[in-house]
Amino acid sequence: HDREVRGGRLRERFDAIVLPDQAPASLLNGHAAGSMPEEYTGGLGTEGVAALRAFVEAGGTLVALDSAAGFAIDQLGLPVRNALTGVEQTVFFCPGSILATRADAVHPLAHGLPETTPVWFEGSPAFEVDQGSVVLRYEAEDPLLSGWLLGGERLRGKAALAEVPLGKGRVVLFGFRPQYRAQSRVTYAALLNALYLSAAEP
């Protein structure tokens, strides 16, 4: 619960924390007071952000799925940008399609993924990474495998999955939902890798 995150000392209890696909403002602020029962109002807030930062810097793994990646990037000041921010839908639009990415076969997060890995993209981010590792990257001029895509060339060279170090820990940014409707069986591997590796010892 939000209040547990705000309470801090997260590294004492967790190896990994997963932020679900949720708008950054919603994660930060939650539902307004008075809009529903009190226990369901409010968000992580500045206290929660500070607690998550302390968790990662102490060696924890923060996993952010799809739109939640924007929360992690902005609130933790990560050296990553969403290349699609501010792009009009008349220029780029992908309402729900399967796109091709290329996996970095030597990266631990890519273990078990095929060289060409399909991902479910639905109004998702695409990352420009200044520091960190790109695990899945859009390489094709037209990455569309199934569905509908406008302006696919804007994705070329951008990251779909990245790992960014922060202190002793790391933030894993998914630019898609690896568990979408329990149907994305291929990309489940990357999510499980992120969780398993959070507890791995050298």
Image (cartoon, rainbow, N blue to C red):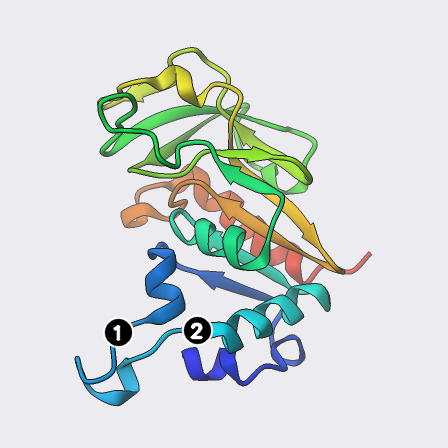
Q: Earlier in the sequence, mark 2 or mark 1?
A: 1
| Residue 42 picture location, percent across and down | 33, 78
168 relative position to 66: left or right: right
Secondary structure found at label 2: loop
* Left or right side of 182 for 85: right
Q: Please identify the quarter of the rendering in which residue 183 is found.
A: top left
Which residue type does callout 2 highlight? Leu
- Figure quadrant of the C terminus: bottom right
Occupied quadrant, residue 16:
bottom right
* Amino acid type indicated by mark 1: His
Residue 31: which disc? 1
> 150 above or below 12?
above
Q: Spot the residue most to the right.
A: 202
Rounded to the nearest angstrom, the CA distance separating label 2 from label 1 is 11 Å
Considering only vertical position in the picture, is 176 above or below 57? above
x 27%, y 22%: residue: 146
- Residue 18 lies, in percent from the top left, at 48, 62
Q: Eyeballing the image, is 51 above or below 177? A: below
The label number, if any, that marks residue 87 in the structure image:
none
Q: Sort mark 1 into few (<14), some (14-19) or many (20+) by Cα contacts within 10 Å.
A: some
Q: Residue sitting at 53 percent across and 69 percent down?
A: 49
Which is more toward the observer, 59 or 194?
59
Residue plotted at (33% across, 56% down): 23
- The kind of secondary structure element at disc 1 is loop
Q: Which residue is mark 2?
A: 44
Depth check: give the residue in front, 39 or 25.
Answer: 25
Q: Nearer the viewer, residue 68 or 120?
A: 68
